[in-house]
Amino acid sequence: MKRYKKPTESRVIISELMLPSHSNFSGKIHGGYILSLMDQIAFACASKHSETYCVTASVDKVDFRKPIEVGELVTMKASVNHVGSTSMVVGVRVEAENIRTGKTKHCNSSYFTMVAKNDEGKSVSVPGLVLENETAVRRFVRSIIRKEEANARRDRFKASEFEMEKHLELLKKYNIKLAL
């Protein structure tokens, strides 16, 4: 196994034509189907980088920016943006193309944290990442900041430390009825 790898060495791109069987009740492509494809490409990318089996540890926020239509060609691009000792953050970008007009649209992006495993299911170390340009550095740093912000959010609302009285004023703006 190489000690360091370039993101281009594990980049994966897949394309799939969206069929009626992939659609939801409103005729758009089902978000769950897209998430499944995103998980598959993240797995492939992480496994190429680590040269071993990987599992999904977490998925960062997914916003469906634009709907995908039946008949569009969906292309997903995945690359390793960040590595830890046994984990990798894989960025996945989803685009849809109208194959009649050639017009493409960015439908969503997300970040999958994948963990490398050996045959016994134990976490194993992964190669480091070669950052060759400003984009790679930006993606790596963004992953660090996103993780720090997620940890701060989690810690801010620990049940043992939550002080409800400090937040009651905020709740007055929302369509709720307190029944404590």
Image (tube, rainbow, N blue to C red):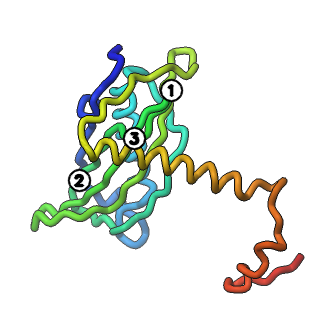
The residue pinned by badge 2 equals 17
Q: CA distance from mark 1 to mark 2?
A: 34 Å
* Residue lying at 80% horizontally and 56% vertically, measured from the top left: 159
Q: Position of residue 85 (x, y in %)?
A: 50, 26
98 left or right of 78 in image: left
Q: Quadrant of residue 95?
A: bottom left
Quick check: 19 above or below 57? below
> 10 Å neighbourhood of mark 3: few (<14), some, or many (≥20)?
many
Q: CA distance from mark 3 to mark 1?
A: 13 Å
Quadrant of image for the N terminus = top left
Q: Disc 3 residue type?
A: Val
The residue pinned by badge 3 equals 90
* Residue lying at 24% horizontally and 35% vertically, measured from the top left: 132
In this orientation, which residue lies closer to the viewer: 40 or 169?
Answer: 169
The residue pinned by badge 1 equals 86
- Disc 1 is placed on an element classified as loop
Q: Are marks 2 and 3 in contact (CB under 8 Å)?
A: no
* Residue lying at 58% horizontally and 52% vertically, measured from the top left: 150
